Image (cartoon, helix red, strand yellow):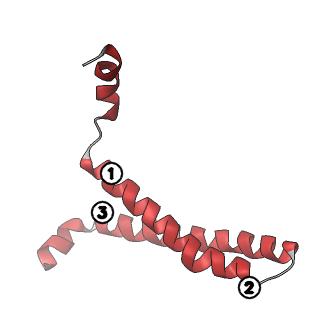
Amino acid sequence: MTLLSEAAAPLLALGTEYYLFGGAGVISLAAFVGLILVPALSAYGRTWEKFAAGFLSLFVLAALVLIGVAIGLVVFYEWDGIVDFI
């Protein structure tokens, strides 16, 4: 191994969960763009209408992120009850 590859090896050692969360983030962002943003932008012809539709789509993205965070927090704090239920 060269000196450069030995120095870069610790920087590239990521856990599996980082790859999984990164992949889930990329898939979620692609789904948002393909299912929400593109249809919203293609529904209008004028530039200002497209800008407004894109801006309002950001509110949809924020709502989806907040719902996901809320569900994640509920699962995190209620995990003992969830395990007992299962």
Left or right position of 58 against 27: right
What's the mark number on residue 66? none
The label nearer to you, 2 versus 3, is 2
Q: Quadrant of the N terminus?
A: top left
Looking at the rendered structure, the secondary structure element under dot 1 is: helix
**On-image quarter of the C terminus:** bottom left
To which residue does mark 2 refer? 43
Question: Which numbered disc flags the more N-terminal residue, 2 or 3?
Answer: 2
- In the current view of this chain or complex, which residue is farthest to the front? 1
Task: From the viewer's perspective, tell me whether residue 45 is left or right of residue 85.
Answer: right
Q: Which residue corresponds to mark 3?
A: 76
Q: Residue at x 72, y 71 (%)?
A: 54
Label 3 sits on what residue type?
Phe
Q: Where does label 1 land, which residue? A: 19
Q: Residue at x 74, y 76 (%)?
A: 53
- Sequence order check, earlier mark of 1 and 3: 1
